[in-house]
Amino acid sequence: MVRMFWMALAAVTICSSAVAQENKGGSLGAFTCTTVADFSNASADTGSVKINNFSIREAKAFIARGASNLEISYAIANRSDVPMHISADFMIFDGEQLPLAALNASPMLNTVQPGKTESASGDTFVNEGVLAKAKTICLRIYSTN
């Protein structure tokens, strides 16, 4: 039952990304996957924007007793002369490609001003030990630049 839910969610995500890619206001990349071990080496450089320094960590949740926080962060350098609006979606899978977590990580107000480098982060509650089970991280980035 749970597997069927996640398969349906993946289908909706794939269909949604196909529609969003037609949006003339920005660009939506396809989901790209990497191993957890190689995640920190992921990067993208279009000339006007560079995205890199990805990290993922799990820490005991401060507010939700018994839960952990799974946090992803990364850096965005806007080399253009216009503000850039960006949002990144992440899906984390175990060795059987079953989803463990999903989250969005974006800079404050989803914006990076011209000539600036900003950090972006996002988190979600998970059961303790989820990161140790994670094998694959898939990410998709939307940007107006």
Image (cartoon, rainbow, N blue to C red):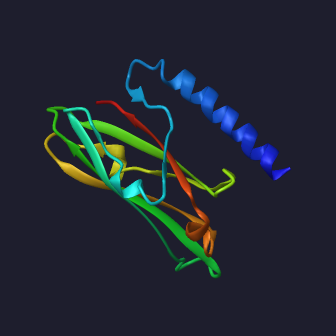
Quadrant of the drawing holding the C terminus? top left
Q: Classify residue 52 as left or right of residue 102.
A: left
Q: Residue at x 86, y 50 (%)?
A: 1
Q: Residue at x 63, y 81 (%)?
A: 65
Q: Residue at x 79, y 48 (%)?
A: 3
Q: Is residue 13 above or below residue 65?
A: above
The percent position of residue 73, horizontal first and vertical second, equals 38, 59
The percent position of residue 9, horizontal first and vertical second, equals 70, 40
Q: Residue at x 20, y 33 (%)?
A: 48
Q: Which of the two residues, 4 or 37, is positioned nearer the viewer here?
A: 37
Q: Classify residue 45 as left or right of residue 8.
A: left
The number of callouts visible is 0
Q: Is residue 63 above or below residue 8?
A: below
Q: What residue occupies the far right of the structure in this picture?
A: 1
The percent position of residue 24, horizontal first and vertical second, equals 40, 18
The percent position of residue 49, horizontal first and vertical second, equals 23, 38
Q: Which of the two residues, 35 or 111, is positioned nearer the viewer here?
A: 35
Q: Which of the two residues, 34 or 70, is positioned nearer the viewer here?
A: 34
